[in-house]
Image: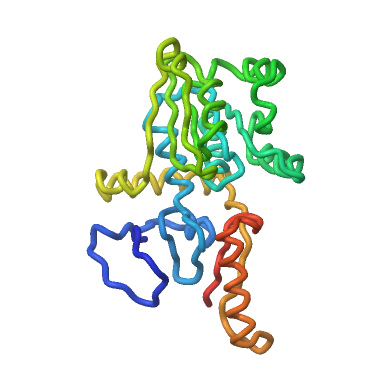
Amino acid sequence: MANSLGTWRQQTVCAPQQLLRLGNVEGISPVTAATVSVNPSTAEIGTLTDGLDLFEAYRMLKDFVQLKPGDVVVQNGANSGVGQAVIQLARAWDVRTVNIIRNKPNFDEVKSNLEELGADLVIAEDQIRTPETSARIKELGPAPRLGLNCVGGKSATNVARLTSDHAHLVTYGGMSKEPIILPTSLFIFKDLTCHGFWMTRWYASHSPAERASMVEEIFELVRQGKFKEPWHEKTVWRENETQSEDEVRGSAMEALRKATDGSGKGKQILVMS
């Protein structure tokens, strides 16, 4: 696997430090292997969206707070690839999750799907600041010491408000394209600490051995059945007796459109052989 190689190509030239060998892939599906890291690909499958979800979730859960069994994490964008990964990793480590998603027409379906992955509490954005939500979070355990934000705007503010004293808010995305606005009181009275996280920076400052160790731990969770493939749709990208070149190209462009505007049901996977 290589990081940030840019456009699709049949061949490329890499320096050894740009590559990460997956190692033992027994029990690992091609989809999992193709979506485990940045700009991933295997011999047969590629993804049209960033596949850093597992790595990013792993690092954010590990690097900012020393979480213990029974602790609680709160996140927005919980139905994203990273959000799904956070839920499953947290469940494997006996950490509870509060998961915030948009109140869309299919809210109940998404909520059910996240609960199947192991989500402890799934709430809509407009339910965050209600007494009922506060009570349900208290039932899970101690107030969250870690908040994860990929949305920004008011959603990030609400995540921060749900955290405990001396908590850490980690921002790794800004889907709303709105700035993060945090009340002064959160810094003065709750001693909130804010961080930005970028997986590429982590790669640059850590060794291939550290990356390989992370991959193997994640793959072992997959082998144990504690981690499922991300929600995805497959598109076969090859000509055959039933598909012309134009039809193949049209299918690929449709997958690209879904990956770009978010209208698909999860990641868009291209099967290339």
Looking at this view, name the residue that lies furthest to the top.
189
Q: Position of residue 88 (x, y in %)?
A: 56, 39
Q: Position of residue 83 (x, y in %)?
A: 55, 41
The number of callouts visible is 0
Q: Is residue 103 visible?
A: yes
Residue at 51% over, 63% down = 48
Q: Is residue 128 left or right of residue 209?
A: right
Residue at 72% over, 18% down = 132
Q: Is residue 95 visible?
A: no
Screen quadrant of the N terminus: bottom left
Q: Nearer the viewer, residue 222 or 102?
A: 102
- The answer to which image quadrant residue 154 occupies is top right
- The answer to which image quadrant residue 106 occupies is top right
Q: Is residue 236 above or below residue 166?
A: below
Residue at 49% over, 71% down = 44
Q: Position of residue 15 (x, y in %)?
A: 23, 64
Q: How is the image coloured?
A: rainbow
Residue at 42% over, 71% down = 8
Q: Nearer the viewer, residue 72 or 218?
A: 72
